[in-house]
Amino acid sequence: MSIRRTEFEGVEGICLENDSISLVVCPSVGGKIVSFCLKDTGQELLWRNENLALRPYPEGTAYDPHFYGGIDELLPNDEKEVIDGIQYPDHGELWTTALDCVSGQDSILLSATLPASGLRYEKKMTLFGDAGTVVMDYRITNTSSKKSHFLLKMHAALLLHEGDRIICPAKRGEIGDADFTGRHESRFFPWPDYHGERLDIVGSAQEKRSEFFFLHDLERGEMRMESPAARTFFSYSFDTGVFPYAWYFASYGGWNGLYTGVLEPATAIPCSLGKSIKDGTCSTLAPGETLCTTVTINAGRLS
């Protein structure tokens, strides 16, 4: 494994690579992973918006008009709203926060204290041997003097091909936004069948449709995208005690004409943290309390 400094579209980054994978992390843009390549074929797995340049944004910037792609993380919220008397920005604080980065012999440590929520974010990233595996060890600490309600969510925007398949051992799905998706027949459905349609199969860009749903009752912590066309896979593995939900957002040529799917293991539902507080589905930390958890990315070629 090697760790070296690099630049990506003029932004300082850190390249981590072994014999199987190469990825670039940019600490100044919330620790976004901007590239994730398979070394043997040179295949890029992450989608990036060709209409946008990579750059830092000030706190409070609206996320959707600046949706660059790659892998973000959302903390402490998704939807812009006032929580615990604090104005939380769109898609959280983390994506606009410049992170400190310390490089070790076989890992990097990204960290920052988020100014509004007072949550201390620490993530250690390690490549596992020569496999296509990235181990991410998290420590989220409430440094404030009052109870913190929060969401922590992965956000991997992937390159898609028609016929790709979302694999997640969930029992039940929930439409996240009926108006956005046009799916008004029912809110809940047995995953992956929605009134005779397979929502686990990726559509073509010509379909001009969008998808957004939450997956419940996970038998194990896995969310995976397999591409028979590209012969690749990308997956998250996680603790369902911490991440009991998996979100999926996609535009198959629909929303803004984009073609990407976003895998989103999450600690809470729905988009409104305020509603999740009322529903009892959000995460909490007492003053001084720390959440420790590990999320693993596995990627490679299908056999």
Image: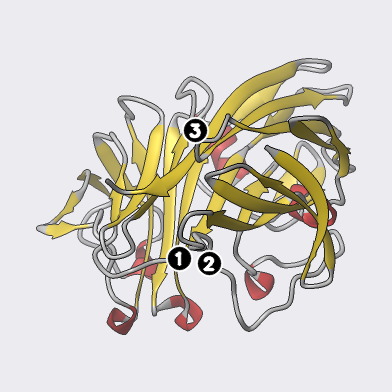
Q: Tell me the kind of residue under disc 2.
A: Trp
Residue 27 location, x and y as percent? 81, 50
- C-alpha separation, residue under disc 1 versus residue under disc 3: 34 Å
Callout 3: few (<14), some (14-19), or many (20+) C-alpha neighbours within 10 Å? few
Whether label 2 touches label 1, CB < 8 Å = yes
Asked whether the viewer can see residue 33, the reply is yes
Identify the mark at residue 159; answer none if there is no mark: 1
- C-alpha separation, residue under disc 2 versus residue under disc 3: 33 Å
Residue at image location 45% in from the left, 65% down from the top: 159
Whether label 2 touches label 3, CB < 8 Å = no
As drawn, is 268 to the left or to the right of 105?
A: left
Callout 2: few (<14), some (14-19), or many (20+) C-alpha neighbours within 10 Å? many
As drawn, is 245 to the left or to the right of 35?
A: left
Quadrant hosting residue 139 = top right
Identify the mark at residue 47; answer none if there is no mark: 2
Q: Sequence order check: which comes first, mark 1 or mark 3?
A: 1
Which tag is nearer the camera, tag 2 or tag 3?
2
User: Judging from the image, what secondary structure is the residue with disc 1 in?
Assistant: loop
Q: Tell me the kind of residue under disc 3.
A: Asp
Q: Quadrant of the N terminus?
A: top right
Identify the residue position indicated by label 3 in the image.
279
Q: Tell me the kind of residue under disc 1.
A: Leu
As drawn, is 52 to the left or to the right of 223?
A: right
Identify the mark at residue 137; answer none if there is no mark: none
